Amino acid sequence: MDDKQRLALGIHCRWYKNVMHGLTIEEIPDDEGDYVQVYWVCTSLGEPWVCLPDTTPQHVRVARLNVRVMTGDLDAEIQSFPPFEGTERHFLRAQIARIAAATSISPQGFYTFGSGEEEEDIDMEEAGDMNFNLNPFYQGHTIKDLVDPSLGYWVHHGRHILPQGRTIWWNPRADMLVTFDIHMT
């Protein structure tokens, strides 16, 4: 199985799990950010590669609160407080999402953010949803600037994982507000 087939299989598995199992909105991972990557692991050399499952905001939120040494057994149960609902493969995937979000850096100016609209047109609520694109006019920095110990020429370009375990804020009370508005009118 080549890389394209593995990626296609991972995307199909994600769609099947989300749609066919009727997950609630807070359980479905973001369509953007660090949940869309597919990761494969191998427990020892020569063993077959295993696709890690998608992570959920709940897994990321609880994994942030736990410190655990992994055993290498992907099916091992996680004994922790607060309780982690899943096996070591879910815990590993949640930790990879956290690491990927914290370490996505690039030289300043390498990416542009948004759809190219004027900054005045961008609403503050939409600012969290901005995508990054390669900057076609990027000239680069000198090596001296890039190795500067102050790291002033390096910036994070990925989304930060919020305390609720998501990269885009989800209002859990939105359904209650809509219901309240319907009954009030």
Image (spheres, helix red, strand yellow):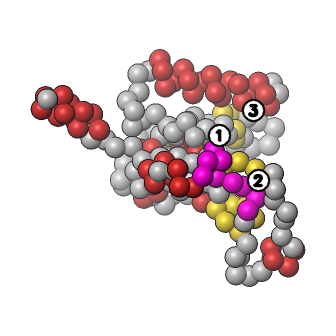
Q: Please report the residue visible at 84 percent of the width from the left and 65 percent of the height from the top.
A: 140
Cα separation between marks 1 and 3: 20 Å
Residue 174 is left or right of residue 127, and the answer is left
Mark 1 or 3 closer to N-term? 1
Residue at mark 1: 37
Mark 1 or 2 closer to N-term? 1
Q: Which residue lies furthest to the top in this view?
A: 20
Q: Position of residue 84 (x, y in %)?
A: 41, 46
Disc 1 residue crowd, few under 14, some 14–19, many 20+, Cα 10 Å: some
Q: Residue type at mark 3? A: Pro
Residue 147 is left or right of residue 73, and the answer is right
Does residue 31 belong to the magenta stretch?
no
Q: Residue type at mark 2? A: Asn
- Looking at the rendering, the stretch of residues picked out in magenta corresponds to 109-118
Q: Residue type at mark 1? A: Gln
Q: In this view, does 133 lie above or below 103?
A: above
